Image (spheres, rainbow, N blue to C red):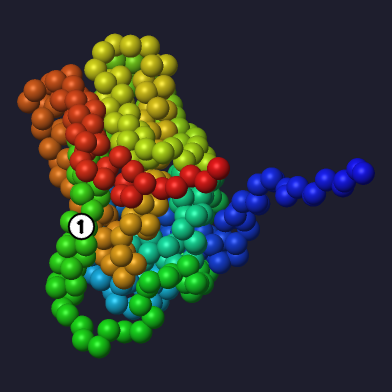
Amino acid sequence: MATTPAPTKSKSRPPGPRSVLRDIAFLRLWAGTTASGLATWALPFVLGLAVLQRELGAAGLGLVLAARTAGFLAAVAVGGVLADRHSRRAVVLWSALAAAAAAPLLAVGLGRSLLLMTVAAALAGAGQGACRPAFQALTAEVVDPGRRQQANAATTLAVRSSTLAGPALTALLAAFVDVATLLLGIGLLWLVAALLPGRGGPAAAGAPDAPRPQRASLRAEFVDGIREARRHPWFLAGLGALTAVIALGYSATSVALPLISRDRYATEWVLAAATTAYTVGALGGALLTARLRPRSQGWVAFAGLAAYGFAPLSLMLPVHPAVVIGAYALAGIGIELFNVPWFTATQREVAPDKLARVSSLDFLVSYGLAPVGLALIAPAIHTFGVTPVLGACAAVCFLVPAAAALVPTARHFGRPVRHDA
């Protein structure tokens, strides 16, 4: 007698996680982060327009931008502590409101009071610095672990796109409105950054919901964040490699590219094309990391960071301009192959109640030493020549990430991430 075969279970794969771009809470955070990034980029560009229109002198521009950097560095560590002590959403709100309040002060001081502009720039920098670690920690609260790399890539895409399209848009607006109005527009961007993001959701597992019964000093809590960072050898190695690349590689190319574009190629086109290629490459790198999940993600990230060495290397010899442009595009791809997994691993590996402090340490060291590199590169080029300096910086870009990749836990940026079939 024939028997009916038993039904077999379906072997279809379960549906993957919903795209982070369909999550309203993340979209609000993404829009706020994008607005803050655009406002951060726009300020020096708009102030540069003020110099072109003779409303601000070159020395005044340097003073104002230095004040903004000082405000950033002074506030980023404090902002990290406050974001771990209190609601990350509240820290984003008040820091972005401070930056928004600085915009009309800059507009009032323009052409009237350099002192007022300097104070306002310091306030803007403080708001920017305080909100950066809070935004990083808030991402870990709003987005579940499986979608954080996609979220970080989406944020990077938005910021890089703003950097690419921003100059043309700002120049277009400058044909119809004055610099003071553009400064007020920057304030509106900061208002968007302050008001749009929502509160953290259930993804903040492990984050403290109630205040601790006793509070240590700000310094003691920041030192506690340093201790947390020291628990992760991959983080210290990555931070050292990133700082070396920014302080030497990025600084060297920032100084040398305009000189070489003018003296070797006798045109500004190479400068513009290489800078654009870097941003376009970064956009491509962000798109790639949105889906790329290598098993040895730390090694891939460090290889991407080391790729920045091709930028100074391309400037050493009289090569065709296409080689320089291609090297900058490769450097842009590589920097995002590092950045996105780096942010994601930090959100995954660091204790949730110390995440903002560790993120602030990241920004403090990498951004803090960048001006030092810029200050030293020009005298070094004058003393030793552009080729030896570029060669040394290229070697640092290649060798330091390679050495960092050998540190324990660097291969996976912490514990290995499971890749389910």
In the image, farthest residue toward the front? 1
Q: Is residue 341 visible?
A: yes
Label 1 SS: loop
Between 223 and 257, which is closer to the camera in this rendering?
A: 223
* Badge count: 1
**Residue drawn at the location 27% of the way across and 27% of the way down:** 309
Please state the horizontal and vertical placement of residue 50, each as a whole percent of the image: 37, 50
Tell me which corner region of the image, top left, top right, bottom left or bottom right, holds residue 138: bottom left
Please state the horizontal and vertical placement of residue 303, each as a whole percent of the image: 32, 31
Residue 384 lies left or right of residue 142; in this view the side is left
Quadrant containing the N terminus in the rendered view: top right
Between 76 and 297, which is closer to the camera in this rendering?
A: 297
In the image, farthest residue toward the right? 1
Up the image or down, 351 lies above or below 400; here it is: below
Tell me which corner region of the image, top left, top right, bottom left or bottom right, holds residue 326: top left
**On the image, numbered disc 1 is attached to which residue?**
231
Looking at the picture, which amino acid does disc 1 mark?
A: Arg
**Residue drawn at the location 43% of the way across and 70% of the way down:** 204
Please state the horizontal and vertical placement of residue 202, each as a whole percent of the image: 50, 72
**Residue drawn at the location 15% of the way across and 33% of the way down:** 378
Residue 408 lies left or right of residue 341; in this view the side is left
Between 402 and 65, which is closer to the camera in this rendering?
A: 402
Q: Is residue 124 visible?
A: no
